[in-house]
Amino acid sequence: MAVSAEDLGTQDIKILLMKQAIPASVGILFMSVNILIDTIFVGQWIGSLAIAAVTVVLPITFFISSLGMAIGVGGGSVLSRALGGNNKEKALLTFANQIMMTFFMASLFVILGIFFSEEMLELFGAKGAIVAPATEFFFPIIFSVPFLALCMMGNNIIRAEGKAKFAMYAMIIPAFVNILLDIVFIKIMNLGMTGAALATSISYVMCFLFVLWFFMNKSELKLELRHFKFNFPIIKEITELSFVTFSRQGVISILSIILNHTLYTYGGEHSIAVYGIISRMLMFALFPVLGITQGFIPIAGYNFGAKNYDRVKESIQISIKYAALFAAVIFVFILFFAKPIVSVFTTDIKVIEETPNALRWVFAASPIIAIQLIGAAYFQAAGKAKKALFLTLSKQGFFLIPLVLILPNFFGIFGVWISFPIADVLSTVITGYFLKKEMNTKLNNTSDGSIL
């Protein structure tokens, strides 16, 4: 399944996409299954309020750890180009600075989180009966966040080295550890939310230990003590390239805050639990679509750089067709099996009654999201950072957040759920416009430029 740079420019696009998308899909699948099963265990063994508590706390930890992801993505670009230019010393300095930046920034946010825990939990939506389980879950898990941040940073460097298999292992290991320890701590030892937090925290540490093992034994990047010095030109370069990734996560965090507060206002604690189930299903159900999107990027990027625009266009068309097909199948499955799916998560009758229709509405526009995802990914692959950032943030930042703030005033809790498909349609229309324009101009060598 290995792919060389030459293959990206010559091999059949369908075969290439399969080779690139399958490992990405497997990694996303294991990560989403981990979150999904974790939510099922918490909901079945502790209760629906526990799902609401996790829904409040995890966006905080992911926001802090996303610093590592952003530094990993930005620094990975610097590092890859340094290795490509045979500048091994710059690559090593970049890697060392990434480690220091990730550790210090994540640790700073953790310290702030500990001292301002009440304010932070309230900001992210911990109200009423959610406060107690959210606090119980928050404190054990906050101490493990620097490990998660370093894992997310390290995973991007592993990919930058071309070791995709080990990057996939780094996502699989914590999933198995978390699921196993959930059974031990929650079901057998009856530790409740503390047990759930401990299981998650230990899984982060195990991921970190695997990443550390990789860099000590398998990596080409062998750091020495002299590399661990702040290099401000490199830090500036990493920071500039990290901005898109961190901006995206920042918008997602703002959306989480607004959603949790709006859901509590119009539906109470159980509505946050409802969204907790839906958000887990969004990542799990769409894993093949997200995998195709990730697999598409290097194919489009290589051929765009080689000015092989016919292959770029072909990769766009095939990726959208395959992703749309998967998304349509997923929507049909959700449409008919929403209630059995929800029943797996909880025994709370109120949550079981409300979630199926909400789930159907949130997934209502999923058959067309392939255009939005692949379109935004194309502009990223082509190095058009401003358009990529605009289109990546369009759904959550420009449409979903305003809709969630406005529609519930007229439609109550239903306004929250219909905000999702409306945002999907609007962002898809915008992305489709830019993508079609690009295909009819920049990429229009021989064919008609149709998206599908």
Image (cartoon, grey):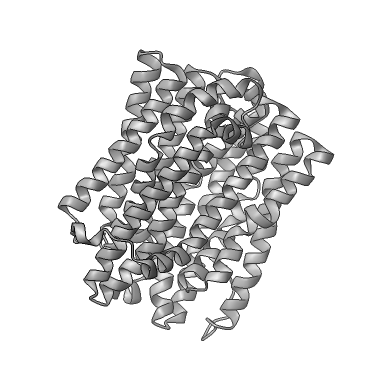
The quadrant the C terminus occupies is bottom right
Q: Is residue 72 left or right of residue 416?
A: left
Q: Is residue 364 above or below residue 33?
A: below
In the rendered image, the residue lying farthest to the bottom is: 445
Q: Is 413 placed left or right of 313 in the picture? A: right
Foreground residue among 425 and 215: 215
User: Farthest residue toward the left?
Assistant: 217
* Residue under the image location 48 percent in, 26 percent down: 137
Q: Position of residue 116 (x, y in %)?
A: 55, 34
Q: Position of residue 414 (x, y in %)?
A: 75, 37
Residue at point 70%, 26% (across, down) = 268
Q: Nearer the viewer, residue 401 or 7?
A: 401
Farthest residue, direction right: 410
**Residue at image point 22% right, 70% down:** 88
Give the position of the N terminus as an image quadrant. Answer: bottom left
- Is residue 143 or residue 287 the one in the foreground? 143
Q: Is residue 378 above or below residue 194?
A: below
Above or below 159: residue 118: above
Q: Is residue 253 visible?
A: yes
| Residue 22 visible in the shown view | no
Relative horizontal placement of residue 74, taking residue 256 as reference (left or right):
left
Frontmost residue, 268 versus 67: 67
The picture places residue 300, in percent across and down from the top left corner, at: 43, 71
> In the rendered image, which quarter is residue 399 located in?
bottom right
Residue 191 location, quadrant: top left
From the viewer's perspective, is 251 left or right of 266?
left
Residue at image location 38% in from the left, 24% down from the top: 182
Q: Is residue 78 above or below residue 186?
A: below
Indicate the position of residue 34 as horizontal and vertical percent values. Answer: 40, 35
Badge count: 0
